[in-house]
C-alpha cells in the first residue's frame, strides 16, 4: 500500500493526505457529538427517574396519612409535578391508571396501557425511551412501598431532549459545512503547494532537454522556495559547464578537422607523387624501353628474313626468340597501361576501366559484363585517378586471387551519386581474416584512397560466394586538394 501511494504524483498524495485528514477530523467531531448527545440523554433519564422516585415517596406519605383516596392522590400528583414540565400517573399492579397529574400524557392519549402494565409488573424503578406518535419520550417508573402499583413520569413535550435532538438535527448540516470548507481548504492548499512544484517540474524537464537559458525564480521562502533557488543555482552552474564543454568541444572538432585535413593533404601529396612517378615510369618505359624492345624485335625479324634456306634451324631459333620478345613487349605494354592508362586522362574513368578490365580479365579466362547506367560525368583528375585505382585493385583481385569465371562491372550515374562496383563469382574470402599479403595490402590501399576523396567503400565477400566491391562518390563532392 505504501509503495502504491509513493508511486502517485505529489498532487494526488497531497489531495489524498488532506482528504484523509478531513475524514478523520469529521469522524472525531461525530464521535464527540455522539458522546455529548449520550451524556445529555443520560442526564435526562436520570432526572426523570429521580422525579418518579420523589413523587412515589410523596405518594407513600399521603397514603400513610390520608389513605388511598383517588381524589387525594390526584391532588398530590398535581402538586408534586411542575406545571407543563412532565405528566405523572398513579397505576395499580395491573397497569390501570388510578390518578393523573393533568388531563393526560402521550402514553395515556395513545392508549399505551400495555406499557403501564409492563412497568407495573416489573415492581422496580426503571426508565425508558419510547417513540410515541413520532416523538421521542422518556418514561420513568417508581414502585410505591405503601400500596400496589407505582408512579409513571413522562415528558410533557420535547423540552427535556430539545437540546440534544436539536443538535442531532443540525449535525448533518454542520458536517456538510465542515466538508465544504475543508474541501475548499484542500483545493487552496493544494494549489498553493503544487503550483510552484508544477512549474519546477517543467523547469526540470527543460533542463533535461538542454534548455539552460531561462532562469527559475520564486518569491516563496519555505522549503519549496529553497528547493527552487537551489535548482536555479544548479541550472546556472550547468549552463556555465555546458558553455565550457561546448567551447572545448568546438576547439577539439576544429583541431580534429585541421589534423584530418592535414592528413588528407599529406596523403594527397603522397598519392599525387605516386601518380606522377607512375606517369614518369610509364612514359620512360613507353618512350625508351618499349621503343628499344620494338626496334630490337624489328632487327631480329630483319635478320631472320635475310637468312638463306640452309639456315633453317637458326631461323626456327630466331622465330622462338621473336615470339618471346613479342610476349615481353605485350607484358611491358600491360605494365605501362597499369601504371598510368592513357585513357584515364584522355577518355575518362569509364573507358579507362573498360579497357583495363578487358585486357586484364580476358587473358585470365574471366568473362566480363560491363554496364553503364545514367550519363557519365567527368570528375577531377585526382578523383578519377583514385577511383580507378580502387576499381583496378578489384579487377586484379578477380583475375589473380578469386579464380572467377565471370565478373560484373557496373557504373551508375544517378541521383547525384556515382556508384561503381566490381563483382565476381570466385571463391571469396572473409574480410575480417585478411591481415596482410597482396590482398590485405590491396584492401587497405582501397580504403585509404576512398577516405581521401570522401567516398564510401563497401567490400562484401564470404568463402564460396564471390566478392563485391562497391564505391559511392557524391558527384557534387570536390575535395580541396583535388583542385
Image (spheres, rainbow, N blue to C red):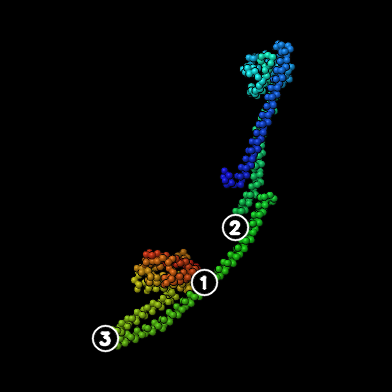
Q: Is residue 226 above or below residue 263?
A: above
Instruction: Report crowding for label 2: few under 14, some 14 to 19, many 20 or more residues within 10 A (C-alpha).
Output: few
Describe the element under mark 3 as helix, strand or loop: helix
Instruction: Report crowding for label 3: few under 14, some 14 to 19, many 20 or more residues within 10 A (C-alpha).
Output: few
Viewer-proximal residue among 255 and 154: 154
Percent coordinates x, y for residue 410 in the rendering: 41, 67
Q: Residue at x 69, y 20 (%)?
A: 52
Looking at the image, the residue that sits furthest to the front is 145
Q: Is residue 231 above or below residue 268?
A: above
On the image, numbered disc 1 is attached to which residue?
264
Question: Distance between the Cα atoms at labels 1 and 3?
Answer: 63 Å
Q: Residue at x 28, y 86 (%)?
A: 314
Viewer-proximal residue among 454 and 52: 52
- For marks 1 and 3, the one nearer the N-term is 1
Viewer-proximal residue among 354 and 19: 19
Q: Residue at x 66, y 43 (%)?
A: 188
Percent coordinates x, y for residue 312 in the rendering: 26, 86
Q: Which mark is residue 312?
A: 3
Q: Quadrant of the N terminus?
A: top right
Res. 440 in view: yes
Toward which corner of the image does residue 340 lie, by quadrant? bottom left
Percent coordinates x, y for residue 348 in the rendering: 44, 73
Describe the element under mark 2 as helix, strand or loop: loop
Looking at the image, the residue that sits furthest to the left is 310
Horizontal side, residue 13 vs residue 288: left or right: right
Label 2–label 3 contact, CB within 8 A: no
Instruction: Report crowding for label 1: few under 14, some 14 to 19, many 20 or more residues within 10 A (C-alpha).
Output: many
- For marks 1 and 2, the one nearer the N-term is 2
Q: Which mark is residue 210?
A: 2
Res. 215 in view: no
Amino acid at each position: 500500500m505504501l509503495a502504491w501511494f509513493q508511486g502517485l504524483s505529489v498532487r494526488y498524495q497531497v489531495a489524498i493526505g488532506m482528504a484523509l485528514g478531513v475524514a478523520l477530523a469529521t469522524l472525531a467531531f461525530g464521535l464527540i457529538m455522539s458522546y455529548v448527545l449520550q451524556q445529555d440523554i443520560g442526564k435526562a433519564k436520570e432526572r426523570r427517574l429521580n422525579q418518579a422516585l420523589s413523587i412515589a415517596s410523596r405518594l407513600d406519605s399521603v397514603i400513610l396519612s390520608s389513605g388511598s383516596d383517588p381524589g387525594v392522590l390526584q391532588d398530590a400528583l398535581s402538586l408534586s409535578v411542575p406545571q407543563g414540565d412532565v405528566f405523572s400517573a398513579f397505576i395499580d399492579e395491573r397497569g390501570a391508571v388510578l390518578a393523573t397529574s393533568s388531563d393526560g400524557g402521550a402514553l395515556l392519549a395513545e392508549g399505551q396501557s400495555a406499557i403501564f402494565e409492563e412497568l407495573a409488573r416489573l415492581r422496580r424503578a426503571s426508565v425508558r425511551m419510547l417513540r410515541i406518535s413520532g416523538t421521542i419520550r422518556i418514561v420513568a417508573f417508581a414502585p410505591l412501598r405503601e400500596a400496589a402499583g407505582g408512579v409513571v413520569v413522562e415528558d410533557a413535550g420535547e423540552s427535556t431532549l430539545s437540546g440534544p435532538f436539536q443538535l442531532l438535527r443540525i449535525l448533518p448540516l454542520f458536517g456538510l459545512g465542515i466538508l465544504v470548507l475543508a474541501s475548499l481548504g484542500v483545493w487552496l492548499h493544494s494549489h498553493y503547494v503544487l503550483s510552484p512544484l508544477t512549474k519546477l517540474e517543467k523547469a526540470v524537464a527543460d533542463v533535461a532537454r538542454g534548455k539552460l537559458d531561462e532562469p527559475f525564480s520564486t518569491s516563496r521562502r519555505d522549503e519549496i522556495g529553497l528547493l527552487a533557488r537551489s535548482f536555479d543555482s544548479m541550472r546556472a552552474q550547468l549552463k556555465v559547464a555546458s558553455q565550457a564543454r561546448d567551447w572545448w568541444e568546438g576547439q577539439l572538432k576544429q583541431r580534429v578537422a585541421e589534423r584530418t585535413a592535414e592528413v588528407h593533404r599529406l596523403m594527397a601529396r603522397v598519392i599525387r607523387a605516386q601518380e606522377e612517378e607512375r606517369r614518369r615510369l610509364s612514359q620512360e618505359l613507353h618512350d625508351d624501353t618499349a621503343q628499344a624492345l620494338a626496334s630490337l624485335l624489328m632487327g631480329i625479324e630483319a635478320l631472320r628474313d635475310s637468312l638463306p634456306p640452309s639456315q633453317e634451324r637458326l631461323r626456327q631459333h630466331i622465330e622462338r626468340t621473336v615470339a618471346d620478345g613479342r610476349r615481353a613487349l605485350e607484358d611491358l605494354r600491360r605494365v605501362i597501361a597499369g601504371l598510368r592508362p592513357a585513357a584515364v586522362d584522355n577518355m575518362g574513368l569509364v573507358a579507362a576501366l573498360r579497357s583495363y578490365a578487358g585486357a586484364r580479365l580476358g587473358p585470365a579466362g574471366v568473362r566480363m559484363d560491363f554496364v553503364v547506367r545514367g550519363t557519365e560525368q567527368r570528375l577531377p583528375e585526382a578523383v578519377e585517378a583514385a577511383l580507378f585505382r580502387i576499381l583496378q585493385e578489384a579487377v586484379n583481385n578477380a583475375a589473380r586471387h578469386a579464380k572467377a569465371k565471370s565478373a560484373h562491372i557496373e557504373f551508375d550515374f544517378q541521383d547525384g551519386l556515382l556508384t561503381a562496383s566490381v563483382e565476381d563469382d570466385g571463391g571469396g574470402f572473409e574480410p575480417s581474416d585478411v591481415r596482410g599479403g597482396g590482398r590485405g595490402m590491396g584492401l587497405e590501399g582501397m580504403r585509404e584512397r576512398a577516405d581521401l576523396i570522401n567516398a564510401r567503400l563497401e567490400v562484401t565477400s564470404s568463402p564460396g560466394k564471390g566478392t563485391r566491391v562497391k564505391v559511392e562518390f557524391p558527384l557534387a563532392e570536390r575535395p580541396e586538394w583535388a583542385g
